């Protein structure tokens, strides 16, 4: 490794190794870096042109793929959102699509539902967290639960949606159970105040297995002597959870928050499509469903493009906020 | 963090500028060349449509033996999404299947006017209105689709009613429903409005019993007065059906396809506003409750002056893409796909009321006979005249009407605005 690094002339200095690179390899990289800089100062002209171009050639495939298959289509999509639909196909209509978008109660509803998802995020994180805690604390049958909890994660949203369509039907088993305990039937998927919560609940049920696995991995790194010490000191279970387990799992919780958020915002389409179709009364629209609906059902692709652009901007902001939070808490550690 | 933000800005800014500057018109390029015609549909993969496709192929091969026809069966769920993408890129199939009405009218830009090529078929086929827009014909009808009011004769008998003499007026109809519910426990209507389709069928199925012929014609012609007493009455009946307990429970969470029809199939509901072709129709109902028990009745008259008619339109039909290389060739294929021999096969195997008026359909049970008998006086269905946008809004508002979160007047005002 060392021999190679020193023998191969380097046209431009390699990027500075990040703080994550530690140990001997990092040291070597830094040494090579210093070496390269030192050499470049005096002997730059000596390098053949091919060697100076080599790094660019080497990164070219990656850059071209990103530029050609990601950024260019993105630019086309954004550009397309400034054109019209139907009779005005291909004409520049300025910001008309965006005006139409924010004028559409359906789109506002879908953005409101994004906010609702963010509010429900703590629940989606707490469910796998609490269940993982029980498994970790070896409640009776914890081995069975560990595998059973993961089962739904391997089912496709379409199958899950179909199952819950049956379970949550007005004359379905869920209402029958409610009836036996004397509670009135709930129109799970037909009541606009309930439907979104029903779908999110099913989504959490279907995906919490992944979070659970991550939590269990986090628990594996916990120092059991701390828990034993707390117990010896007479701490109750809630106190152990609050003062020992949660602080010890801070990084894990952050990771689950980020991945759950991404999952909720990007992979609800299948469930919505199968369970509610955006209804009742448009109460379960999410932006991606709205985009699909405008493009395919209403044949307004330019309007759908505008909605995509707005969703992209929202996701960019949310993603950067999450990165910022993760980085800050990483520093605190 | 700062550097990342800078990068993002550097990437986004040109995109925004790019967007403001240019708006390129999509250019079109030919679809299938090389003596091949590509057809998109969602039917040719069905076993029941096999004989139909065979007959159409044979008819076409007789005229153009050297041209190959390729049928691409798309999943119906995604059909208009895929078609929209093809239209956007200006290349795709030469001939494509459409549902009549809004789905076709929203896409006439991409279609070739066919009236000159199909002149000879005008008399033989029925249901052209659903495939016409602005004086041009954009597709040739294959099947007829309509919304007969079906009833279960067995339930009528159990309730002591004469199954051959269903109610002629709305009051009698309500009285019959009350008797049936008392005697059999079956609800009056099987109704599913999860997708917002329930109101469309209700409007088209029962509207003819409310609107006068003049109002009906004006509505179809595009002169729609949403606040007229007749239209208001239809929507009030929609609410009344729910509040008076005529519907099954959980209408807004019951899917029309196929939970609603399943209620009628199982005898839990006495009436359903169904379809003529494909699904939710006489053939399907007959398989469950017996063909002899499937009745078809005209809409009960709810308002003086109304003359009930069978609401029907062209159901599905084939159109030609404007980018096709040889329009005449593609139009010939459309003619083969709507030839009498092909449509006869479709009617016999797929259980559809075919668009060809020369086919004898009286041998398939009393319901079919009743439907076919009413075809000559039939009129286009009320909801088919509406745009996809208005239909979507009507679906949402109809759910709100059932849950009581909007009034009839308010809903009609919103619909009038959308239908401008």
Image (spheres, rainbow, N blue to C red):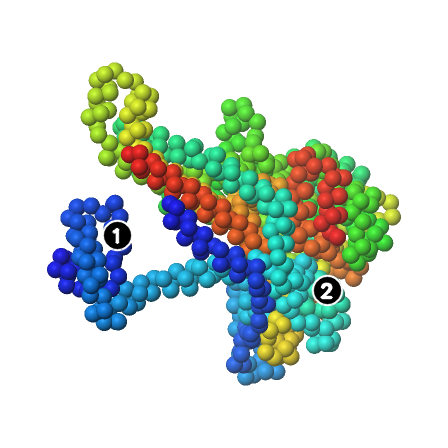
Provide the secondary structure element on which disc 2 rests: strand
Within-10-Å neighbours for mark 1: few <14, some 14–19, many 20+? few
Which residue occupies 41% across, 53% down? Answer: B7
Which residue occupies 76% across, 71% down? Answer: B123
Q: Nearer the viewer, residue A54 or A228?
A: A54
Which residue occupies 34% across, 62% down? Answer: A62
Q: Return the chain for callout 1.
A: A
| Residue A251 can be seen in this image | no
Total tally of numbered discs in the picture: 2
Instruction: Name the residue beneath numbered marker 2.
Output: B133
Provide the secondary structure element on which disc 1 rests: loop
- Residue A147 spot, x, y in % from top left: 31, 38
Pick out the residue farthest to the left.
A3
Note whether A195 is above or below B118 in the view shown: above
Q: Nearer the viewer, residue A106 or B315?
A: A106
Is label 2 or label 1 in front?
1
Real-space Cα distance between discs 2 and 1? 66 Å
**Quadrant of residue A47 in the image?**
bottom left
Instruction: Name the residue beneath numbered marker 1.
Output: A16
* Rendered-image quadrant of the C terminus of chain A: top left
- Residue B284 spot, x, y in % from top left: 61, 53
Do the CB atoms of the residues marked 2 and 1 lie less than 8 Å apart? Answer: no
Within-10-Å neighbours for mark 2: few <14, some 14–19, many 20+? some
């Amino acid at each position: 490794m060392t021999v190679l690094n020193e023998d191969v002339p380097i046209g431009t200095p390699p990027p500075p190794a990040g703080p994550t690179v530690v140990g001997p390899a990092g040291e070597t990289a830094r040494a090579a870096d210093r070496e390269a800089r030192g050499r470049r100062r005096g002997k730059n002209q000596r390098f053949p042109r091919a060697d100076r171009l080599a790094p660019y050639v080497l990164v070219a495939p990656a850059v071209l793929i990103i530029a050609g298959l990601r950024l260019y289509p993105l630019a086309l999509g954004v550009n397309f959102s400034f054109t019209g639909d139907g009779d005005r196909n291909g004409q520049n209509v300025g910001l008309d699509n965006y005006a139409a978008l924010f004028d559409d109660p359906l789109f506002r509803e879908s953005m409101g539902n994004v906010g609702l998802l963010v509010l429900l995020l703590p629940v989606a994180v707490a469910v796998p967290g609490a269940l993982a805690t029980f498994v970790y604390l070896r409640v009776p049958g914890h081995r069975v639960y560990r595998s059973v909890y993961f089962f739904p994660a391997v089912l496709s949203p379409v199958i899950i949606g179909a199952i819950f369509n049956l379970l949550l039907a007005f004359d379905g088993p869920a209402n029958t159970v409610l009836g036996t305990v004397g509670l009135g039937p709930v129109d799970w998927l037909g009541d606009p105040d309930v439907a979104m919560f029903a779908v999110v609940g099913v989504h959490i049920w279907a995906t919490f297995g992944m979070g659970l696995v991550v939590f269990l991995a986090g628990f594996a790194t916990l120092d059991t002597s701390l828990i034993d010490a707390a117990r010896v000191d007479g701490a109750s279970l809630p106190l152990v959870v609050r003062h020992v387990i949660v602080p010890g799992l801070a990084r894990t919780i952050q990771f689950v928050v980020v991945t759950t958020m991404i999952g909720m915002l990007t992979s609800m389409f299948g469930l919505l499509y199968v369970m509610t179709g955006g209804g009742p009364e448009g109460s379960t629209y999410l932006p991606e469903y709205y985009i699909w609906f405008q493009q395919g059902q209403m044949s307004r692709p330019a309007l759908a493009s505008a909605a995509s652009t707005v969703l992209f901007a929202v996701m960019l902001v949310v993603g950067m906020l999450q990165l910022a939070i993760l980085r800050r808490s990483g520093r605190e550690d | 963090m700062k550097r990342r933000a800078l990068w993002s800005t550097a990437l986004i800014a040109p995109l925004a500028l790019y967007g403001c500057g240019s708006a390129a018109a999509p250019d079109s390029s030919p679809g299938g060349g090389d003596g091949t015609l590509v057809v998109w549909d969602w039917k040719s993969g069905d076993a029941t449509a096999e004989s139909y496709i065979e007959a159409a192929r044979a008819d076409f091969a007789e005229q153009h033996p050297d041209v190959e026809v390729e049928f691409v069966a798309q999943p119906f769920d995604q059909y208009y999404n895929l078609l929209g993408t093809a239209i956007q890129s200006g290349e795709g199939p030469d001939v494509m299947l459409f549902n009549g009405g809004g789905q076709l009218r929203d896409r006439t830009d991409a279609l070739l006017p066919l009236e000159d090529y199909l002149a000879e078929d005008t008399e033989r086929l029925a249901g052209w209105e659903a495939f016409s827009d602005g004086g041009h014909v954009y597709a040739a009808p294959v099947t007829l689709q309509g919304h007969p009011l079906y009833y279960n004769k067995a339930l009528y008998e159990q309730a002591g009613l004469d199954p051959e003499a269903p109610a002629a007026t709305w009051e009698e109809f309500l009285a019959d429903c009350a008797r049936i519910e008392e005697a059999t426990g079956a609800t009056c209507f099987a109704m599913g409005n999860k997708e917002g389709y329930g109101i469309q069928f209700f409007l088209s199925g029962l509207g003819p019993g409310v609107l006068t012929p003049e109002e009906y014609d004006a509505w179809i012609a595009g002169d729609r007065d949403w606040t007229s007493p007749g239209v208001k009455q239809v929507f009030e009946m929609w609410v009344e059906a729910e509040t008076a307990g005529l519907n099954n429970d959980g209408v807004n969470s019951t899917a029309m396809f196929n939970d609603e029809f399943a209620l009628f199939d199982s005898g839990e509901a006495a009436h359903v506003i169904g379809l003529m072709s494909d699904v939710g129709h006489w053939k399907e109902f007959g398989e469950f409750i017996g063909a002899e028990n499937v009745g078809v009745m005209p809409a009960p008259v709810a308002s003086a002056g109304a003359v009930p008619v069978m609401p029907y339109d062209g159901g599905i039909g084939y159109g030609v893409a404007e980018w096709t290389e040889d329009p005449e060739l593609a139009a010939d294929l459309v003619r083969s796909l709507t030839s009498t021999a092909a449509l006869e096969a479709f009617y016999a195997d797929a259980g559809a009321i075919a668009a060809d008026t020369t086919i004898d359909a009286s041998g398939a049970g009393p319901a079919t006979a009743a439907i076919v008998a009413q075809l000559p006086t039939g009129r286009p269905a009320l909801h088919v005249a509406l745009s996809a946008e208005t239909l979507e809004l009507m679906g949402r508002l109809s759910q709100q009407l059932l849950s009581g979160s909007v009034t009839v007047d308010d809903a009609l005002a919103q619909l009038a605005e959308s239908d401008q």
